[in-house]
Amino acid sequence: MRGGQDEARAPVLQFTNCRILRGRALLREDLWVREGRILDPEKLFFEERRVADEQRDCGGCILAPGFIDVQINGGFGVDFSQASEDVGSGVALVARRILSHGVTSFCPTLVTSPPEVYHKVLPQIPVKSGGPHGAGVLGVHLEGPFISREKRGAHPEAHLRSFEAEAFHDVLATYGALDNVCIVTLAPELGRSREVIGALVARGIRVSLGHSVADLQAAEEAVQCGATFITHLFNAMLPFHHRDPGIVGLLTSDRLPPGRRIFYGMIADGTHTNPAALRIAHRAHPQGLVLVTDAVPALGLGDGRHTLGQQEVEVDGLTAYVAGERRACPCRPPLREQALGLSWHVGVPCQPAAHPHCVPGGLWSHRACALCSQGTKTLSGSIAPMDVCVRHFLQATGCGVELALEAASLHPAQLLGLEKRKGTLDFGADADFVVLDDSLHVRATYISGELVWQAEEARQ
């Protein structure tokens, strides 16, 4: 009884002059918050006979549920797949920095790694509520190592694994404890995969299909065993074919268990997926679309070389590729580079006479030069934050603001079975929300009704 009395005494915040995303519509209503949850104003008025203790004018902005990123490999120089004694500080840094992009919850993602990395990293990433310190951690997403060699993408081949005779015991031997894990991406065509899917689902872990050469039948069988997600649709899987659409065919399959909805991740960064492909997926199955960043540690940093697990990636403009081998360049002696403290050739003044492929008078660009570059064209994640993905998705598909926002909030919450608390502004849900202008730029971010980030211009 006392808990109810304490809650009744707690201050009530009323957010006014706003449009709330609720029930797939933008409603001109106020948002009421108490004790970190969305409040039903009718009960406040008629049962408690109370009014708000504080009102905040939102200036006509949109209030949407906080974004949820279920696939993010790191960012701002932090690589979740790098083992260290203090993984938590890196996770905390990313959690804090993504607040400015409207993300209130996320799933730190580990790419294919050796067992010792999983054993060291996973215990250091517990589920954690969000707050002023940063976005909440909903659980870890393990992408690999049980994936296809042919469709491994940026995952290092040396650490890929298959399911051996012990099946799920081999999974445990690879990962260690699964207490902090909420999603596992695997290739359903691997032997014993159905057994593993069933065991993971029985533990409450969502199974995602990806980095795979599976045909549609294998994908459907995986869903019948409990798989519910597709990792970055169209990327690292067989292309759609009219006789066998492969994993992509799950979007319109008629062989899914009754009542089962398949969700699928989309990287709407303008690089990974052509706008026409975004439109096809959206129109085929709009209620299953989940926007993900698949952000790499280079998120928020500039061009150059960065890590992604056991590999290096090369950022060139808006694109991240698996880096190639480094060669000696005649532009400058390696010893001089070392003396200058430079990383390889980046930023070293060019000598066009010695190296005609470089731009005269400019700085040396190792990607532009064929003589000393062995880069690849294998994409290795994104460097676009979630709010950028939301805006690009809206522009590319013309889907409407409501669906674009739900693809980054409600749908990932539904995937994880958290739709009663996250991804919604319904009464009783966590008061995690983002304040957006009409162009969907983030003005402020709230977690549990508390302001955790605000744009500079909004503070004035």
Image: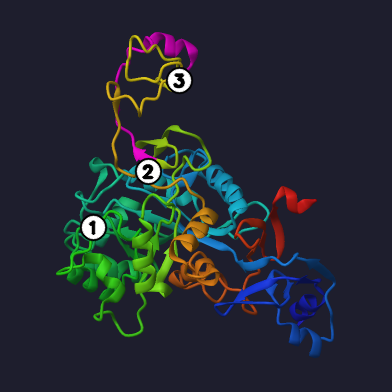
Residue density around tag 3, few if under 14, some if 14–19, many if 20 or more, within 10 Å: some
Task: Give the amino acid type for the residue marked by disc 1 in the picture.
Answer: Ser
Task: Give the amino acid type for the residue marked by disc 2 in the picture.
Answer: Val
Q: Is residue 159 located in the magenta-colored stretch of the structure?
A: no
Q: Earlier in the sequence, mark 3 or mark 2?
A: 2
Q: Which residue is mark 2?
A: 117
Foreground tag (3 vs 1): 3
Label 3 close to label 2 by CB (< 8 Å): no
Q: Which residue is mark 3?
A: 363
Q: Residue at x 34, y 73 (%)?
A: 284
Foreground tag (2 vs 1): 1
Outermost residue, front side: 360
Real-space CA distance between mark 2 and mark 1, rounded to the nearest whole angstrom: 23 Å
Real-space CA distance between mark 3 and mark 1, rounded to the nearest whole angstrom: 40 Å
Real-space CA distance between mark 3 and mark 2, rounded to the nearest whole angstrom: 37 Å
Task: Give the amino acid type for the residue marked by disc 3 in the picture.
Answer: Leu
Helix, strand or loop at disc 3?
loop
Foreground of the two, 93 or 115: 93
Q: Earlier in the sequence, mark 3 or mark 1?
A: 1
Relative to residue 301, is residue 372 drawn left or right? left
Q: Residue at x 35, y 61 (%)?
A: 276
Give the magenta range: 320-342
Instruction: Give percent across and percent down for residue 206.
Output: 38, 67
Residue density around tag 1, few if under 14, some if 14–19, many if 20 or more, within 10 Å: many
Specify whether residue 310 is in view.
Answer: no
Q: Which residue is mark 1?
A: 212
Specify whether residue 249 is in view.
Answer: yes
- Compared with 120, 107 (above or below) is below
